[in-house]
Image (cartoon, helix red, strand yellow):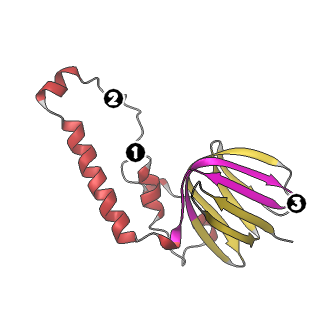
């Protein structure tokens, strides 16, 4: 018995295939779904969704939305999604470096900005895009446990 998984964005269907297992980045943590799962509706966070088809784990970057599980069917409705295999790692790294540089420059600001700037809280998290950029470093030779969670060590600045 398999799960039918559909990942749907406003402009296209990103994934529509049967899988054996799915791990969703819900707003309350990672959520694993196997065939026969109880009906469920959950909010999704920005993160990496993983699907197991046969022995292979595939990654899909999702940018927030909802997932519904019912009768061995999982519908994932998200604002944006991209298959991990479609991500150009060099281009993603270049965009990340550019965004990091722009962020650092914005933190410096001009003298006029510095007069009115409020200090950031000491516990403020870095940009969310670090998670997705770090997930681009995952490859097919990693174990299932490594693919299920992005290690904080992979995320610079956290």
What element does badge 1 sit on? loop
- How far separated are the C-alphas under marks 3 and 2? 46 Å
First to last magenta residue range: 60-84
Q: How many marks?
A: 3
Query: Which numbered marker is on residue 120?
Result: 2
At x 27% / y 56%, what residue is drawn? Answer: 98
Q: Position of residue 9 (x, y in %)?
A: 60, 56
Q: Position of residue 84 (x, y in %)?
A: 52, 68
On the rendered structure, is 54 left or right of 96? Answer: right
What element does badge 2 sit on? loop
On the rendered structure, is 111 left or right of 43? Answer: left
Residue 121 makes an appearance in the image: yes
Tag 1 near tag 2, CB within 8 Å: no
- How far separated are the C-alphas under marks 1 and 2? 13 Å
Query: Which numbered marker is on residue 127?
Result: 1
At x 63% / y 70%, what residue is drawn? Answer: 144
Q: Which residue is mark 3?
A: 36
Residue 148 makes an appearance in the image: no
Q: Closest to the observer: 43 or 37?
A: 43
Q: Residues within 10 Å of mark 2 (few under 14, many from 20)?
A: few
Classify residue 154 by image quadrant.
Answer: bottom left
Query: Which numbered marker is on residue 63?
Result: none
């Amino acid at each position: 018995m398999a799960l039918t998984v559909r990942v749907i964005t406003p402009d296209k269907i990103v994934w529509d295939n049967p899988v054996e297992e799915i791990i969703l980045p819900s707003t309350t943590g990672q959520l694993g779904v196997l065939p026969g799962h109880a009906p469920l509706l959950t909010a999704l966070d920005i993160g990496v969704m993983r699907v197991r088809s046969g022995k292979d784990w595939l990654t899909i970057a999702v940018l927030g939305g909802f997932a519904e599980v019912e009768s061995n069917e999982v519908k994932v409705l998200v604002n944006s999604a991209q298959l991990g295999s479609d991500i150009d790692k060099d281009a993603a790294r270049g965009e990340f470096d550019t965004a990091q540089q722009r962020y650092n420059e914005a933190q410096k600001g001009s003298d006029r900005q510095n007069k009115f700037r409020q200090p950031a809280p000491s516990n403020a998290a870095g940009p969310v895009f670090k998670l997705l950029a770090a997930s681009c470093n995952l490859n097919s030779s990693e174990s299932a446990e490594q693919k299920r969670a992005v290690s904080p060590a992979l995320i610079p600045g956290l």
